[in-house]
Image: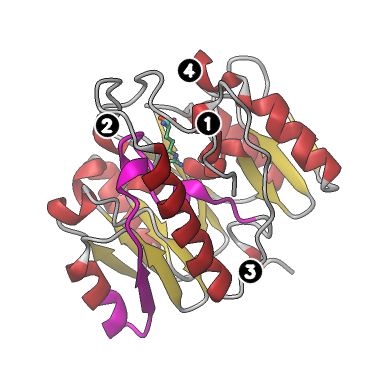
Amino acid sequence: MCPPDYYGIEYEINPWMSRSQQSDPEVARQQWESLYQVLNSLNARIELLTPVKGLPDLVFTANAGLIWKERVFLALFRHEARQGETPVDQEWFQDAGFETIEMPDDYFFEGAGDALFCGETLFAGYLIRSDVRAMQWVAEKMNCRVIPLQLVDDFYYHLDTCFCPLSETEAIYYPPAFDEYGQQALKEHVPHLIPVVEKEAQRFACNAVVIGKSVALNTGCPQLEKDLNQLGYETYSTPLDEFIKAGGSAKCLTLRLDGECAAVWP
Ligand code: ARG
């Protein structure tokens, strides 16, 4: 995670962001700390990235890259506004002992924001931020199956805003964020899909952090919490409204250093 010292709405690169709707630094700090506490109480060991002035979205560490064992595929951000984050992330990863892999030129790739494992299959959101060829390139290197999913709603511009794997066979999703083909592909590959309603998708219900049978998410998603409880998951909601102003929530504020598919690695 990266503390929100320099977080703010300094540019507009998704429909949630509006410079005229600034975040409150004090409240953002409190909300970030509460999320940190929730994850900490779930026994997550949290490493911190030092915030950098002029990189307001650095808090959204999910986009730093995709972790693969001891390696990380670094992001290549589509928008120039975020491209300065990559050298900062790269340095952090190298200091932490990860081998960093850079994307080929013009292969836009926004890390774990768009690339999520469900079981051994990589689900890859593309078009709005990441490129489909970038996803294919990454999957080829990992030698894994990739299911490309076109994102069709600008409000759900990263895959982790509309899809959240819970286990090898279960995931949360917001159907209208995908085209017919994508919805079909999800149904074919994930036996238990939990749809969220529009009102809760707008509260970033799909942007949850899953740790075993515990799920941390934004407030305002009672239906999803009920569905998760019924499936045996404990839910921990904590307000993250200040980050929704930039188009992010719980999951975006974290990056799993043990990878998105730690459970299935040999
Ligand atoms: N303002 C950031 C952007 O538009 C938010 C990133 C949210 N991250 C995520 N993994 N969905 O890039």
Which quadrant of the figure has residue 234? bottom left
The disc labelled 2 sits on which kind of residue? Trp
Q: Nearer the N terminus, badge 4 or badge 2? A: 2
Residue at image point 27% right, 84% down? 230
Q: How many marks?
A: 4
Which residue matches tag 2? Answer: 16
Q: Single out the mark in the foreground, 4 or 1.
A: 1
Alpha carbons under labels 3 and 1: distance apart: 36 Å
Give me the residue at 15% from left, 57% from top. 197
N-term-proximal mark, 4 vs 3: 4
Q: Say what secondary structure mark 2 lies in.
A: loop
Q: Amino acid at mark 3?
A: Val
User: Which image quarter: residue 54?
Assistant: top right
Please provide the residue range marked out in magenta: 227-256
Kind of residue sitting beneath label 1: Tyr
Q: Counting residues from the N terminus, which is met first, the one under dot 3 or under dot 1?
A: 1
Secondary-structure class at tag 3? helix
Q: CA distance from mark 2 to mark 3?
A: 34 Å
Give the residue at mark 4.
Answer: 79
Q: Which residue is mark 3?
A: 264
Q: Is residue 256 left or right of residue 97?
A: left
Q: Which mark is residue 6?
A: 1
The vertical placement of 111 against 169, above or below, is above
* Residue 39, image x, y percentages: 53, 67
Q: Is mark 2 within 8 Å of ligand 1?
A: yes
**Whether label 2 touches label 3, CB < 8 Å:** no
